Amino acid sequence: MRDVAVIGIGCTTFGEKWGTSFRELFLEAGALALEDASLSGEKIDALYVGNMSAGRFVEQEHIGALIADYSGMASRHIPSTRVESACCSGSLAFRQAMIAVASGLEDVVVAAGVEKMTDVETSTSVDALAAAADREWEGFVGATFPGLYAMIATDYMNRYPLTREQLAQVAVKNHYNGARNPIAQFQKEITVETVLRSALVADPLRLFDCSPITDGAAAVILAPLERAREFTDAPIRILATSQASDTIALHDRRDISTMDATVAAGRRAFEMARLTPSQIDLVEVHDCFTIAEICAIEDLGFCQKGEAGRLTEEGETALNGRIPVNTSGGLKACGHPVGATGIKQVCEVVQQLRGDAGRRQIDGAEIGMTQNVGGTGASVAVHILGRA
Amino acid sequence: MRDVAVIGIGCTTFGEKWGTSFRELFLEAGALALEDASLSGEKIDALYVGNMSAGRFVEQEHIGALIADYSGMASRHIPSTRVESACCSGSLAFRQAMIAVASGLEDVVVAAGVEKMTDVETSTSVDALAAAADREWEGFVGATFPGLYAMIATDYMNRYPLTREQLAQVAVKNHYNGARNPIAQFQKEITVETVLRSALVADPLRLFDCSPITDGAAAVILAPLERAREFTDAPIRILATSQASDTIALHDRRDISTMDATVAAGRRAFEMARLTPSQIDLVEVHDCFTIAEICAIEDLGFCQKGEAGRLTEEGETALNGRIPVNTSGGLKACGHPVGATGIKQVCEVVQQLRGDAGRRQIDGAEIGMTQNVGGTGASVAVHILGRA
């Protein structure tokens, strides 16, 4: 396999984008990525797009073709492929794009993610998102994601030392970081009280424990590492890609407070990159709910099981901490346009490794990681990137 | 890139399968493919699944995880990825699986396709399928696929010599072949009169010009060619994979009677395999409507533009003809569970190349081709396979 590098990144602002359609969101992110790589669209050999549920959000499937068409690339008849794995769709598009370049089949490839979630009523969104769980055994009996993650939080808090305040501190940290990220949906700092006084959604999770419903798109451009300097002075090398599955229904898991797919994907990624957690300078994890960040930090091996609450409270996951987590603001503050999230995570890591992250920059960051989750952990993708 | 071979195939019967759920359909096809390759599931390194619209047909997304779980592979946390490209989804899952093996990242990989279409009312199915067209510019104004392909047929018949009877002969031939295929939804022979007397759906297309709504699944197992004989005495080598895009809306095409994406994908595949059309022993094409087969034969280069009607009438595309087309019965007689169709095409070619096609066997077939279309031609994938 050839080494592969990221040579360009682009991300729309995330939020309630009433004036921008599904296809326009992709175009905006793609154009930013091309500009970032100083490339014209004619140089693109293939497209991969992560999207969870345009079929239900905007009644449109065939997303690969749509995107190729509206970006003007259909005239060259380039291959364009949609990949879906619920909230992990973006990372899997990135992974497939990387494999296509690594194989030698393609050279310059766009990996993008897009979701337009606000064109339907909230109840429709919630039901569309519930299709990431097991429809027959979870959705059918009324389980939606806040409830499922609340069960994880309840189980976790019964077995490990995690206080309600420590859980709130995940949100406080991510809002602090988001307030320093121009693309974030929420750019306001909050306090522990903001979280604790917010409406109860599914006990123990409150409104400020939950990531919002969001429109947005992100795109990155990949090329063989050996060609990367044709396009950029600061190529970022993909050191590892990994992906793991688990039972789709939460009740079938060995242990609902540990995401075995995160453990498996993390181990495989560290092995592929020949690195250990202590060598990672920052990590973007999938904090769809605050409890998910707690589990992710532990399941990736950044601390022992049961320690992530204390780690968060002591500021070790903050911008100036031992292992900064979700420097972008995470899903919590950036928002979570599900198909786009995995690609946005890569964009953040690339910005950090380039030293372009402005007020949220981690000094001297050389190696970064992303962890992107589908559902309650039925699919997880992990990527490690490093300065080339 | 490593050479890749098909080492196992499996296909459910196609039809209205009221007693079989979406997930059970996949399991049935997967189990048949494992049995065919004399493999246990423990040997599988990764899964790729083609599916167009489970979100709208059965309210389930996150198909990769679902499939990994219900096939018992989630316990090993193997990667499982859903690929979507409307009716071309199956072929793109096959292509991604092939690239994963060719890259060296994976060894033994399942590529499957599945669609469960009959659990909703017909009007819902038709609307779900319309999401393969441009929702904003086609679906929104009421265009559905019979109407779009009727426009292609009308344009074609105005410009090229194709009689209504010749068009009907496509259906007659495919029903003849389907009557010899145990998995086909329709196993009855028909006559030109059957077609001409059937209900008008969208002028000039009648009921028997249209492929039906179908449940079904198909799976194939891929491995590096160098390891293929560990699993089978008759490995089938993948000689070429190609994929092309075009505008999603029909009205934006250069010429609606020629599928430029088929032309592009066909050329690329012949180039990759270093073959010409005259060296192909049989071809499975995407006859979602009879006119689509006429265009496909020409656009792949098996005859000049305007000749496919005469070719069909003269029997040159029949089982004993110069270039047998849709020996399986095609989408017309087998049925068209959209995500499964591309994989079923590969299963048919593999059966023919192995000499296992029974009453529809093409004597001495050594090289076969598949052409799978998304929408009205906005995505097309072509594969060429040969005896190893």
Image (cartoon, coloured by chain):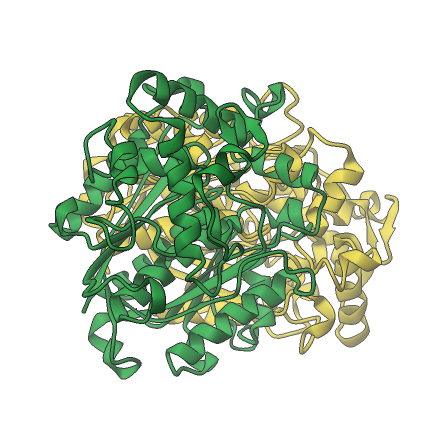
Chain colours: A green, B yellow
Q: State the quadrant of the N terminus of chain B.
A: bottom left
B336 relative to A29 in the view: left or right = right
Q: Please report the residue visible at 32 percent of the width from the left and 33 percent of the height from the top.
A: A295
A63 relative to A245 in the view: left or right = right
- Where is residue A5, by image quadrant? bottom left
Of A224 and B16, nearer the camera is A224
Q: Please report the residue visible at 59 percent of the width from the left and 25 percent of the height from the top.
A: A139
Of B269 and A176, nearer the camera is A176
Of A58 and B112, nearer the camera is A58
Of B47 and A325, nearer the camera is A325
Residue A69 pos. (x, y %): 59, 70
Against B240, residue A163 (above or below) is above
Residue A96 pos. (x, y %): 36, 55
- Where is residue B274, by image quadrant? bottom left
Looking at the rendered structure, the number of numbered marks drawn on it comes to 0
Residue A8 pos. (x, y %): 36, 72
Against B276, residue A375 (above or below) is above
Q: Please report the residue visible at 58 percent of the width from the left and 57 percent of the height from the top.
A: A15
- Where is residue A136, by image quadrant? top right
Residue B59 pos. (x, y %): 62, 33
Against B186, residue A73 (above or below) is below
Residue A327 seen: yes
Residue B314 seen: no
